[in-house]
Amino acid sequence: MSAPNLELDALLARETRTTADLEALLSPGADARIQSPGGLEALAKASADLTLRRFGRTVTLYAPLYLSNFCVNPCVYCGFSSRQQVARATLGEDQIRAEAASLRDRGFSHVLLVTGEDRRQAPVSYLERAIHVCREFFAHVSVEVYPMDRDDYGRLVAAGAAAVTLYQETYDRGVYADVHPGGPKADYDARRAAPIAAAAAGMRGVGLGFLLGLAPWRDELRGLFVHAQEVARASWQTRLAFSFPRLRPAAGGYSPAHPVSDAELARMIFTLRLLFPDAELVLSTRESARLRDGFLGLGVTRMSAGSVTTPGGYHEKSPAGEQFAVHDTREPAELAAVIAARGLDPVWKDWSEAMTEAP
């Protein structure tokens, strides 16, 4: 049987896509077309057209706010790993307030609260307080922390969290075991179940992703597709988001076994847009300014800006160790100006919350 052809028109004509469509987009036939002159551009145009219809010309800007870099997991690729000798810190309430005020002064109304995976340093009660503080400054607060059960996610929802992001890191169980040799994170199934629990608990948004470079990207994309479907089944009201964290330099100097090229990254972004027309696609400051600018209008709908990946650092310089090296170091206003120059609208506030809140 010949390899299935890439039929963009047929994919776009349907409201939903299936595993068969994913396989068509990853097939040798798709490779031949995409690698031919104009092939990737055709896929980019399909992604851009679909994004424009679903999201208009908007690009939402957000900032990560790191609360703690304490971690009990000895992950081999991460700057926060318990095996790394880095300066550790957990922000107190006054420090969180100062960081939040600094970000609000720079224009942000959407913040992502991030911690390492150490419940002793950042228990659920600590996260609840941090969310309450940040709700004084921001219209939209999301979290990227350790996995939780449905009840704990429900507490964060009640505190005012709108979304949760949790990367599976890799969907290859063998690779997962190799790069997570101990700690709670070694439990593949528990981590995989957590985003489903978050959706069931009422999180309006659930962000998924894998670390680009740990395993072959096609296999990872297949695993992500199935996982996203499971999250969607847990709550039809939950909006999915996908991030593309390509491994960047961090403490320990980990080198990925399957590095992902710019063209492969582009193909992943365009493919996920076709498969999930209403999902947010997120590109962080891990990537260069040149590359991020190149994706404007082509499928990405959310970008971080002016990011600091240590606890503290917006209000005043922090000695704490960073999770990874930031590549795009532009100030938020500079990125917003670039977005506007492309004919797009930089959005500082997530208006979906205001539209769904009861009067």
Image: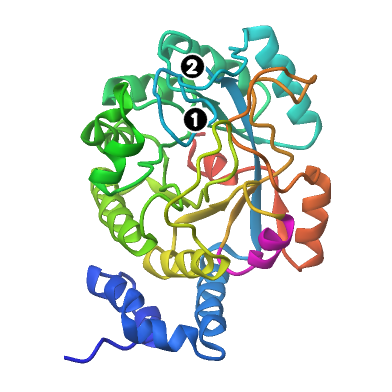
Q: Residues within 10 Å of mark 1 (few under 14, many from 20)?
A: many
Magenta residues span 289-299
Q: Which residue is mark 2?
A: 127
Q: Are the residues flagged by discs 2 and 1 in contact, CB closer than 8 Å? A: yes
* Amino acid type, label 1: Val
Find out whether residue 136 is within the magenta segment: no
Q: Quadrant of residue 346?
A: bottom right
Q: What distance separates the C-alpha of mark 2 from that of mark 1? A: 9 Å
SS class, disc 2: helix
Q: Main secondary structure of the magenta part?
A: helix
* Amino acid type, label 2: Leu
Camera-side residue of 169 and 294: 169
Q: Quadrant of residue 155?
A: top left
Q: Position of residue 237 (x, y in %)?
A: 35, 46
Against 16, residue 85 (above or below) is above
Against 106, residue 42 (above or below) is below
Q: Residues within 10 Å of mark 2 (few under 14, many from 20)?
A: many
Q: Residue at x 34, y 86 (%)?
A: 29
Camera-side residue of 301 and 6: 6
Q: Position of residue 240 (x, y in %)?
A: 40, 50
